[in-house]
Image (cartoon, grey):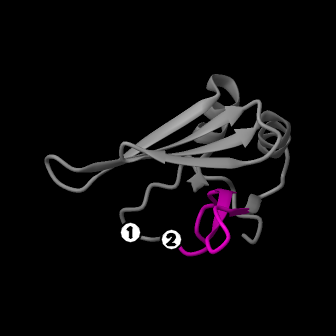
Amino acid sequence: MRLTQTEVGNLVHLGRILETTQFGPNSRLVYELVISKNSEIAVDFQDKKISVLLPKKIGEPWANSSEVSIRQDIQMDEKCKLSVLIEKDFKCQTKRAGENEADMFPNPHC
């Protein structure tokens, strides 16, 4: 998940952000990032919705720092591991026509 400045702010202030990807008139995928009281990052998938539960003790310090990403591998079962990556979305180094990057984080390499 890549988050804009507004999304990072909403995550901290509202405790949750939610997005939907439409795959046609009757098919969509919902995904959310939720600040939780858990001690570790957790994931859930139910009713076409992916929920990533981010512990408050990890999410708030990250949001209020220059740290770029949170990464964790979660062992789902003995054969399956899920990699979770949450990043602050930076402005591109090269301008692209039609791209609105006003809400992205300043790129540290520019």
Quadrant containing the C terminus is bottom right
Amino acid at the residue labelled 1: Ala
Residue 49 covered by magenta stretch: no
Q: Residue at x 66, y 53 (%)?
A: 105
Q: Using residue 69 as the reference point, say whether residue 26 is left or right of it.
A: left
Q: Which residue is mark 2?
A: 95
Q: Residues within 10 Å of mark 2 (few under 14, many from 20)?
A: few
Instruction: Judge the density around disc 1: few (<14), some (14-19), many (≥20) Cα neighbours within 10 Å.
Output: few
Q: Are marks 2 and 1 in contact (CB under 8 Å)?
A: yes
For badge 2, the amino acid type reads: Lys
Please tell me the numbered disc located at residue 97. Answer: 1
The residue closer to the viewer here, 33 or 104, is 33
Q: Is residue 78 magenta?
A: yes
* Residue at image point 77% right, 30% down: 37
Inter-mark Cα distance, 2 to 1: 7 Å
* Depth check, front residue: 70 or 2: 70
